[in-house]
Amino acid sequence: MPELPEVEALKDFLTENLVGHEMVRVLPVAISVLKTYDPPLTALEGREVVAVHRHGKFLDLETDGGPHLVTHLARAGWLHWKDRLPDGPPRPGKGPLALRVALETGAGFDLTEAGTQKRLAVYVVADPQEVPGIARLGPDPLAADFDGASLAALLKGERRQLKGALRDQTLVAGVGNAYSDEILHAARMSPFKLAASLTPEETETLYQALRTTLTEAVERSRGVAAGRLKSEKKSGLRVHGRTGEPCPVCGDTIREVSFSDSSLQYCPTCQTGGKPLADRRLSRLLK
């Protein structure tokens, strides 16, 4: 799933390639991707893109005097830039293509979504705050005014485990499954540790890990072409998606806890005092 660093890089890429250009065609291929109907997609056509914004994991294309085109790439969505779009309209079918945006130059981009769980979302709105997911977002962890005290206030009285708290978009915007693993590894904290149990010193450690992990990921992604961002993300991850590999910090074997639709990875030596965390799904399978 694209998270804050990848969406930030896409925002920078689109700012460079879209701003100042006119959207001449916005062509839906998978109708299910559209989550709003008024204004229609055609309200974007003939409009110049004047800015590109990021709200958490949402991309927001602002047009001159017109509506915003907002998208959330969800788990399996992606944006593919093309210097020259194919001639002729795209054909609806069983492929991954969901939406095509064509510019007056002949360039443009496709939004695609792999797999059968269709969660890619496109909104056309007068104000991004009309998108429910944006209206509910917590603070951006890379905002200039987001400091250690801000994180401490968010975690005060928070009875959830750190892993779940970091992934909650209403608490902190933009962090998902992968970067929550990376942040907790950098902070040397168990993903199952209760958020409200952190001492002031631990909260500051978590804050520094949060800012550093996300900032470094953004810097790695900046300037990378849209088509290469996924591989760039994977290459920079130290524990997430690396079950069975040695921890790059201590050399211990990275372990995994599986859930119904996701998993987390961690290093026992760095994060849990050398003790493996219980994997309830695996335990049930072994009974």
Image (cartoon, grey):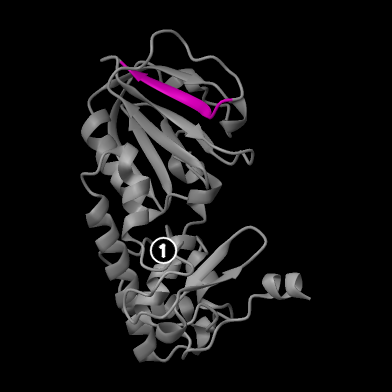
Would residue 104 be found to the left or right of residue 283 on screen?
Answer: left
Examine the structure image and report whether residue 101 is included in the region drawn in magenta: yes
- By secondary structure, the bulk of the magenta-drawn segment is best described as strand
Q: Specify start and end residues of the magenta stretch as a single range.
A: 95-103
Q: Which amino acid does label 1 sit on?
A: Tyr
Image quarter of residue 182: bottom left
Examine the structure image and report whether residue 179 is included in the region drawn in magenta: no
Would residue 180 be found to the left or right of residue 35 on screen?
Answer: left
Residue 178 % position (x, y): 45, 61
Is 156 located above or below residue 105 in the figure? below
Q: Name the residue under label 1.
A: 179
Which quadrant does the C terminus fall into?
bottom right
Image quarter of residue 92: top right
Q: Which residue is drawn at 38% across and 13% down?
A: 86
Residue 136 % position (x, y): 52, 56
Question: How many circles with numbers are drawn on the protein?
Answer: 1
Viewer can see residue 12:
yes
Residue 251 % position (x, y): 36, 79
